[in-house]
Image (cartoon, rainbow, N blue to C red):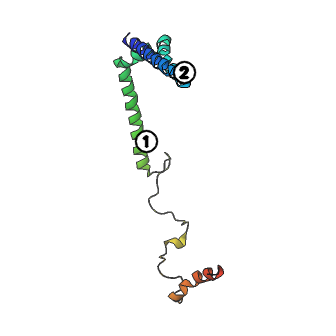
Amino acid sequence: MLAETVCSAVSAAGLGIAAVTAYRRRFLAAARITAYALVPVGLVMTGVVEWLTDIVFNPTVWLGFGLLGLAWLILATTRAVERRRLGGTGEPGKKAKAGPSPEAVAPAASKPSLGSADPARAPADDFSDIEAILKKHGI
């Protein structure tokens, strides 16, 4: 009963604001405010407000929401533990491999790249590629 009274008061105040807005010749804004002001009365007339107040003030409903939250928390925790245990593969049937794969994708990538591939090559020749590119572009 209290919720219906509050909704009616909100609608009446909204209609009053819409009337003042229309008096100021802002008709589009007044029409929009009128539409918003009619929503609470419409909700009261359809019974939605009574249904919502029954849900909000019912402790059984809140216990149900609490149980749903607990179930979601348990599911999320078990997923996180499962992913961590499997090594982040994301597939329940597969376990993560302990070491590197026997077939390397780029076998030369594991070699150190500090020195040149040809030890007979002088360090001054390392810039020959860059010089060729610059000459090609006329620089």
Most foreground residue, 31 or 83:
31
Relative to 123, residue 27 above or below: above
Residue visible at 39% across and 25% down in the picture: 65
**In the picture shown, does residue 107 fall above or below 38?**
below
Looking at the rendering, in which quadrant would you find the C terminus? Answer: bottom right
Q: Please give the name of the residue rendered at 50% of the width and 22% of the height, measured from the top-left corner.
A: 24
Residue 121 figure quarter? bottom right
User: Crowding at label 2, few (<14), some or many (≥20) Cα neighbours within 10 Å?
Assistant: some
Answer few, some or many: residues within 10 Å of disc 1's Cα (few below 14, many 20 plus, some between 14 and 19).
some
- Taking depth in this image into account, of 124 and 63 the one nearest to the observer is 124
Q: Secondary structure at mark 1?
A: helix
Q: Name the residue tied to disc 2.
A: 31
Residue 39 visible? no
Q: CA distance from mark 2 to mark 1?
A: 51 Å
Q: Nearer the viewer, mark 2 or mark 1?
A: 2
Q: In the rendered view, tell whether residue 92 sits above or below residue 23.
A: below
Quarter of the N terminus within the rendering = top left
Label whose residue precedes the other's in the sequence (2 or 1): 2
Question: Disc number at residue 35?
Answer: none
Tell me residue 82's x, y (percent).
42, 45
Task: Label 2, secondary structure: give it.
Answer: helix
**Residue 85 location (% of width, % of height):** 41, 49
User: Which kind of residue does numbered mark 2 sit on?
Assistant: Ala
Q: Quadrant of residue 5?
A: top left
Residue 40, horizontal then vertical, whole percent:
46, 17
Under mark 1, the amino acid is Arg
Which residue is at a point 43% across and 47% down the rendered structure image? 83
Q: Is residue 91 visible?
A: yes
Residue that numbered label 1 is attached to: 79
Tell me the residue at 40%/18% (across/down).
Answer: 55
Q: Nearer the viewer, residue 114 or 76?
A: 114
